[in-house]
Image: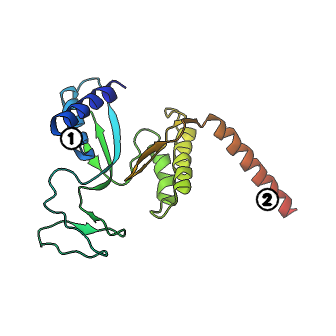
């Protein structure tokens, strides 16, 4: 939590100095610079930064859209989303992994740690970009549950955040220890039904 407090302080200072929010990519870069002096030491920090960058600062590329159509020059990276809102590669949802060895990776999904192969197994099989919020929450729980169930070094707690352009919400922290026993009961009932249907 030390890095979280330090990063929050630096982000607030940036906001006060520049009168605008620091982007997620900017925050990842700042954190990477903060962690760089600890490279090669016993300090091990790995964070996944998630957020939604809105149009800020320089808006030379942005054009107004009218009924999902707009005029743009050839050098503009602007595009129109399905809602008719102009966007650029610098806006929208961001997911960035930062660790103390200096790595700063932006991607669509991340699973880090010794249990990550189990989580990736679930994510690779079930992930679709058309999931509803409830389906996405169930998938995230399942991925963490499978990782913690099969890997002795993974914890049991799940912290889920739902991030949109309007803001974010956090679900109550959930301990999946009891989920293991419920899963065993479900499997036992499924086996029992299967055996009964064969008889």
Q: Residue at x 16, y 39 (%)?
A: 18
- The reply, left or right, for residue 14 in relation to residue 155 is left
Which of the two discs, 2 and 1, labels the residue nearer the N terminus?
A: 1
Q: Which residue is mark 1?
A: 29
Which one is in front, 4 or 44?
4
Q: Residue at x 44, y 38 (%)?
A: 114
Which one is in front, 76 or 86?
86
Q: Is residue 44 visible?
A: no
Residue 10 lies, with reference to residue 122, above or below; the image says above
Q: Residue at x 13, y 60 (%)?
A: 60
Residue 141 in percent (x, y) is at: 55, 46
Query: Which label lies toward us, 2 or 1?
Result: 1
SS type, badge 2: helix
Residue 193 lies, with reference to residue 3, above or below; the image says below
Which one is in front, 138 or 183?
138
Residue 108 in percent (x, y) is at: 36, 55
Q: Quadrant of residue 12?
A: top left
- The reply, left or right, for residue 128 in relation to residue 84 is right
């Amino acid at each position: 939590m030390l890095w979280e407090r330090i990063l929050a302080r630096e982000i607030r200072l940036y906001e006060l100095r520049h009168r605008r929010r620091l982007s997620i990519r900017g925050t990842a870069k700042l954190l990477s610079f903060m962690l760089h002096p600890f490279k090669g030491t016993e300090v091990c920090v790995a964070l996944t930064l998630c957020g939604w960058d809105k149009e800020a600062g320089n808006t030379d590329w942005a054009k107004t859209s009218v009924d999902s159509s707009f005029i743009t020059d050839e050098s503009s990276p602007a595009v129109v989303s399905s809602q008719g809102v102009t966007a650029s590669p610098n806006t929208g949802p961001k997911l960035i992994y930062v660790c103390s060895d200096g790595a700063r990776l932006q991607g669509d999904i991340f699973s880090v740690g010794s249990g990550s192969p189990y989580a990736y197994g679930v994510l690779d099989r079930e992930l679709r970009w058309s999931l509803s919020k409830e389906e996405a929450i169930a998938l995230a729980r399942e991925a963490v549950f499978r990782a913690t169930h099969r890997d002795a070094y993974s914890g049991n707690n799940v912290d889920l955040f739902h991030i949109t352009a309007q803001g974010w919400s956090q679900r109550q922290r959930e301990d999946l220890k009891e989920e293991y026993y419920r899963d065993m009961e479900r499997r036992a009932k499924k086996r029992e039904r299967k055996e009964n249907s064969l008889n």
